[in-house]
Amino acid sequence: MYKKILLAYNGSTAGQKALLDSRDLAAWGQSQLHLVAVMPLNLNTVVAEGIVYSAQEEQQQTQAYERVLQEGLQKLDELGYKAQGELLSGDAIQEICACAKRISADLIVVGHQRRTGWIGRWWSGSISKSLVEEAPCSVLVSIL
């Protein structure tokens, strides 16, 4: 039985399906839900193709991720589930795993949307695949 479920939420359609799946699991096992959104590393320190992001752009990015997190918490609340929410910043795999350890999660739930074609699968990194390898607990991949 899972007592603490960590849901990695990004607002995508696959993420929304994972949110509903974690809700069903929480109801079944009377588990605590912990919702996280992971923002990429501090954009002021990231230089991509010669572009350095400004503090204003970083603030806009932070606000966008906060909105995603609040949207997920609100959806759970509307369905009658209370969850704690947290905005993390850094590498998604490292941050999700560190949070799972910190809160003693029994299960991580993450959404995954299958890529069409071999180029799409090859080109994109898979957070769900990496979590299965790195996580300190069980991982449920909710496939869209």
Image (spheres, rainbow, N blue to C red):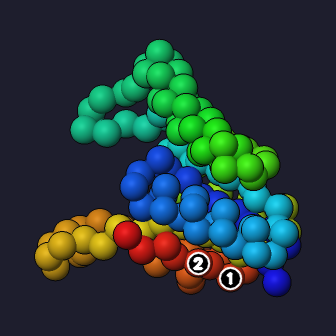
In this rendered view, identify the residue nearer to me: 115 or 58. 115
- 33 left or right of 66? right
Q: Which residue is mark 1?
A: 138
When the figure is inspected, residue 38 is found, relative to residue 55, above or below; the finding is below
In what element is the residue under mark 1?
strand
Type of the residue with mark 1: Ser
Type of the residue with mark 2: Leu
Label of residue 130 in the image = none
When the figure is inspected, residue 71 is found, relative to residue 119, above or below; the finding is above
Q: Which residue is pictured at 60% across the width and 44% down the height?
A: 75
CA–CA distance between discs 1 and 2? 7 Å
Q: Position of residue 67 (x, y in %)?
A: 55, 32
Q: Which residue is pictured at 40% across the width and 26% down the height?
A: 53
When the figure is inspected, residue 101 is found, relative to residue 47, above or below; the finding is below
| Residue that lies at the very extreme toward the front in this rendered image | 79
In this rendered view, identify the residue nearer to me: 38 or 1. 1
Label of residue 140 in the image = 2
In this rendered view, identify the residue nearer to me: 87 or 81. 81
- Neighbour class for label 2 at 10 Å: few (<14), some, many (≥20)? some
- 53 left or right of 142? left
Q: Position of residue 29 (x, y in %)?
A: 81, 75
